[in-house]
């Protein structure tokens, strides 16, 4: 009789043990993080006509076709300027008015960190440069509906100069060094003279599902590392820097 009850005892013991040790919770797979955005950096100066042309004709495409959704765009308004003395005096390639506009655009980026906000203001200025009406740059406050006070204060109180010195440090630290502007960099790689095809490079390096805008760019031939002489589309660093300083 005792031997016949033994299996029953073992069964009851196993059941009791299972109650005292609850089963581990099920582990659900963590949602995957979205792919990293592509860093697009534009090193430029405000009165280089090729920079202005690029910013008015080409760069806005990423907003129009939606590619901006996978892009982290940064603007660096310094270009081929030079620090000419120990006081941090900056001389700009196209004269003192370029220094003024470089600083104003640096102040706009600092005042309105939101890309959509500062880009519309900078676009307005660069369009005036293309139209050769850049001395009317203050009209861009009214055109965009943005308040002028913070930007003007930034320019006048010296903060703008400090921003420009920071941009100078970043520009001078580029590897490889820039040899002209516009100098367009995608994820750390300069595009050299193929900069107008920057969208194709963005689509090539983006690790996520390609945005719809990339479909029309798939057949576009890109030329990574090309350093051909784009004499009619850039402002060279070796060109004479204006003696007039900011």
Image: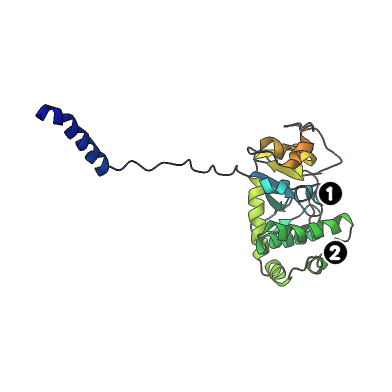
In the depicted structure, whether residue 106 falls above or below residue 172? below
The tag earlier along the polypeptide, 2 or 1, is 1
Tell me the SS state at disc 2.
Answer: helix
Q: Which residue is outermost to the front?
A: 1
Instruction: Mark 2 vs mark 1: give the one in front.
Output: 1
Q: Quadrant of residue 138?
A: bottom right
How many discs mark residues in the rendered view? 2
Asked whether, in this view, residue 119 is left or right of residue 27, the answer is: right
Q: Quadrant of residue 24?
A: top left
Q: CA distance from mark 2 to mark 1?
A: 21 Å
The residue at which mark 2 appears reads as: 135
The residue at which mark 1 appears reads as: 57
Percent from the top left, x then y, of residue 142? 80, 69
Mark 1 surroundings within 10 Å by alpha-carbon count, few (fewer than 14), some (14 through 19), many (20 or more): few
Percent from the top left, x then y, of residue 124? 81, 60
For the residue pair 205 and 40, the one nearer the viewer reads as 205
For the residue pair 199 and 33, the one nearer the viewer reads as 33
For the residue pair 148 and 82, the one nearer the viewer reads as 148
Can residue 45 be seen from the camera position used here?
A: yes
Percent from the top left, x then y, of residue 132? 89, 58
Quarter the C terminus occupies: bottom right
Percent from the top left, x then y, of residue 214? 74, 39
For the residue pair 120 and 156, the one nearer the viewer reads as 120
Residue at (74%, 41%) from the top-left corner?
212
Q: Which residue is outermost to the bottom?
A: 149
* Color theme of the render: rainbow
Asked whether, in this view, residue 142 is left or right of residue 111, the answer is: right
Asked whether, in this view, residue 89 is left or right of residue 24, the answer is: right
């Amino acid at each position: 009789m005792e031997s016949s009850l033994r299996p029953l005892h073992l069964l009851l013991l196993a059941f009791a043990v299972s109650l005292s040790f609850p089963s581990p919770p099920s582990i659900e797979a963590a949602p995957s993080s979205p792919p990293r955005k592509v860093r697009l950096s534009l090193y430029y100066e405000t009165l280089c006509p090729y920079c202005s042309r690029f910013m008015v004709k080409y760069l806005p495409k990423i907003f129009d076709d939606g590619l901006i959704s996978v892009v982290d765009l940064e603007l660096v308004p310094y270009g081929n300027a030079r620090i000419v003395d120990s006081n941090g005096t900056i001389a700009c390639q196209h004269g003192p008015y370029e220094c003024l506009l470089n600083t104003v655009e640096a102040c706009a980026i600092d005042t309105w960190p939101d890309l959509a906000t500062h880009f519309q203001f900078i676009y307005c200025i660069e369009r005036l440069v293309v139209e050769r009406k850049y001395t009317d740059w203050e009209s861009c406050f009214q055109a965009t509906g943005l308040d002028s006070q913070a930007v003007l204060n930034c320019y006048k109180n010296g903060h703008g100069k400090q921003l420009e010195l920071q941009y100078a440090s970043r520009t001078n630290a580029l590897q490889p060094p820039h040899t002209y502007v516009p100098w367009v960099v995608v994820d750390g790689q300069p595009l050299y003279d193929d900069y107008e095809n920057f969208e194709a490079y963005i689509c090539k390096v983006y690790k996520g599902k390609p945005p719809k805008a990339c479909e029309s760019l798939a057949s576009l031939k890109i030329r990574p590392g090309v350093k051909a002489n784009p004499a009619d589309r850039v402002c060279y660093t070796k060109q004479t820097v204006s003696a007039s300083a900011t």
